[in-house]
Image: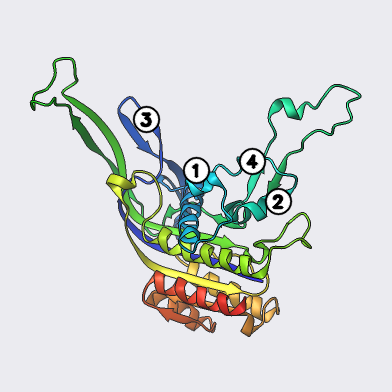
Amino acid sequence: MVYLRVTGRALINVHSANAEGAVGNYMALSKMFVIRRRGDQGYEVSEEPVISGNMLKHWHAVSMVEILKSWEYEALCETCKRQVMYRSAFSLEDEFEYIKRCAIEDLHGFLYTPPRERQRGRKQGDSEEREETIRRESLVKFSFLVPVEDQRAEYSSVTFNRVVIDEKGSIPKKEQAMMVMKREHASGVYGLLCSMDLAFAGTSLSNPSRKLPPEDIKKRVAAAISALTNVLSGSLGAAQARSFPIIKVLELVCFVARKPIPNAVHGFYNDYAKETAKIIKASLIQELVGKDDVKVVVVGKQVAEAFREGQVTYEETETAAEAIARIAEVVNGWL
């Protein structure tokens, strides 16, 4: 059984990873109200550019697909292979059949709703049963990436244009000389949070006695963990072709347990590392997990200091990629 929790902070410069659609030729970023604690002054409310958990889930799933394809793993449906992530495009008998067919339906969940004419069923007296909705809860969960409590993010628009010319190098009279588009971009320090209940990979949630072979489960879990490296190195969000996020993970806490364990505190909060260390320590004291059943890997001196003060055993690495690789190594040994 494997339960993974990841929290931390990343500096992201000049990204346009989540937009709300264009008004005319202007593309605005997705924004949401964020509440910050301000000590004796109470709370401060501001509107900030954010990156949705849905966006992060999509790109994590894309990374999973590419990793599994590189391992020549065949249990992927055609839409997921093409990075469509429809979840799900086919009609099967029950949840476990979807799990067997595709690793993404397994890890990222799905909702199959039969077409409306099938939902109505046949005429009264018809013996054929009506097709039912089938769903699976996602084992991989992401919070929004949100500018941290310590400071706001800033954003502004960038102008893009396209010049139309013919084979002679001149601008045709019937063509518009420049196709101008403005798109907002933001920069800031963002907090993140991810939770993966990988203990249920390859296992039917509606009937836990039905499971895939251990080797299938091991590959799917390994791909889910490894895909985090791609996400945290910038493979996330929209407009990557011309606005690939300039990202650097500043701090990270990764912990994995063999038994159920509470979620970490979101990296948005300025005391997230101390609070997360307290959660892990409380779980050990309450014997929710044993000391040999949990592994903690951190990135960042201040994070390491918080765990040292909290008297929680940890391993420190210099980069997020190294931390995730270490967690993957530990999980591989457990499985």
The amino acid at mark 3 is Ala
Q: Is residue 17 above or below residue 313?
A: above
Decide: few, some or many residues near mark 1? Use Cα within 10 Å; few <14, some 14-19, many ≥20: few
Please name the residue that numbered disc 4 is placed on: 90
Decide: few, some or many residues near mark 2? Use Cα within 10 Å; few <14, some 14-19, many ≥20: few
Distance of mark 2 from mark 4, alpha carbons? 11 Å
Please name the residue that numbered disc 3 is placed on: 22
Q: Secondary structure at mark 2?
A: helix
Foreground disc of the pair 3, 4: 4
Please name the residue that numbered disc 2 is placed on: 97
Please name the residue that numbered disc 1 is placed on: 84
Query: Residue at coordinates 34% horizontally, 51% vertically from top-left?
Result: 153
Distance of mark 3 from mark 4, alpha carbons? 32 Å
Distance of mark 1 from mark 4, alpha carbons? 13 Å
Image coordinates of residue 204 in percent, x first then y, are 73, 57
Q: Earlier in the sequence, mark 2 or mark 1?
A: 1
Q: Earlier in the sequence, mark 3 or mark 2?
A: 3
